[in-house]
Image (tube, rainbow, N blue to C red):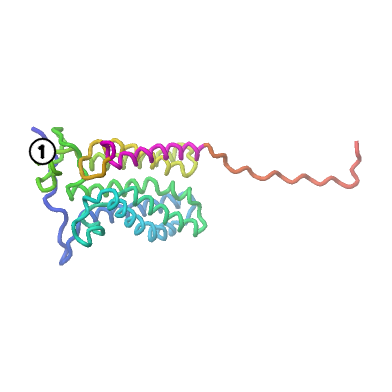
Amino acid sequence: MALHIPSPAVSGFHLGPAFIHVYGLMYVVGITLAILITRRRWAARGGNPDLVAEVATWAVPAGIIGARIYFDVTTPGNIPPHWWGVFAVWSGGLGVWGGIAAGAAAGAWRVRRAGADVRKFMDATAPALLVAQGLGRIGNYFNQELFGKPTSLPWGLEISPAHRPPGYAAFSTFQPTFLYEMIFDLALAAALVWLGHHRTIRPPGLFALYVTGYSAFRIFEETLRIDSSEHFFGLRLNFYIATILTITGIVWFVVSQRRKPGVPPPEPAEPVPSNATEP
């Protein structure tokens, strides 16, 4: 008997008069864990852990705004048909790359203002970001989104008819790409932590590996996904972005590791005594 993964019948729950969307809740949990992980890693590098909360105050809102803008620009067909549709993050629709770009820019600005090392801070955040992204994918599961092509595999994801894309109404089980990405994100986070402890990686090498690894996985994932997206030459827009970022991450890592550490200035020459005898 096939052991398919059932999709939740609801996407949230009521807490008094408020309806709590699991999608938003999982992002809150992910961001909280990311802050805690970064605090510990930053403190281990000799940094002030209180800086992490200050950075998050700027980076998190910027990341959410950037993620929504990226989603609206790259998948306009998925925007709810209301005046508030472009803002409807509670119904899903946050583009990871837009969020990371905007959040990283705001965070780097705050770290630099504090006089701390931006490159070291980026390395401290890399595994934490992956944990947040991985947990965020649980929200996609409750929204019945981020799934792939139809499949008969035992771990196929059951999708209700209302959430199936046009042309796929006859299929009931699909590739659980949200699950693939969640597992990969957590595995890559663990790998980056291991590398940081067992190998000499010059900053921001771990962050460059994060960009490389995550983007490389998205190349694979984009070949499976069937949700709405802009296409060019038969391929999804995010496929090209993932490819560009994978190459960028590799080059970034190589350059960062080949960069020569600072050479201390030469010691000043000792003065020659005035009564020294010439040879």
Residue 12 position, x and y percent, is: 16, 56
The question of residue 248 being in magenta is answered with: yes
Q: Does dot 1 land on a helix, a strand or a loop?
A: loop
Residue under numbered circle 1? 171
Q: Residues within 10 Å of mark 1 (few under 14, many from 20)?
A: some
The question of residue 208 being in magenta is answered with: no
Q: Where 170 sits versus 20, above or below?
A: above
Residue plotted at (36% across, 54% down): 35
State which quarter of the image contains the N terminus.
top left
Residue plotted at (91% across, 40% down): 277
Residue plotted at (33% across, 39% down): 240
Residue 185 position, x and y percent, is: 31, 42
Q: Residue furthest front?
A: 233
Q: Amino acid at mark 1?
A: Phe
Residue 150 position, x and y percent, is: 15, 36
State which quarter of the image contains the C terminus.
top right
Which residues are the magenta region? 232-257
Q: Is 259 placed left or right of 263 in the picture?
A: left
Q: Nearer the viewer, residue 170 or 255?
A: 170
Q: Main secondary structure of the magenta part?
A: helix
Residue 88 placement: quadrant? bottom left
Residue 85 placement: quadrant? bottom left
Residue 17 placement: quadrant? bottom left
Q: Is 26 placed left or right of 60 in the picture?
A: left
Residue 244 position, x and y percent, is: 38, 39
Q: Where 69 sits versus 176, above or below?
A: below
Residue plotted at (22% across, 57% down): 90
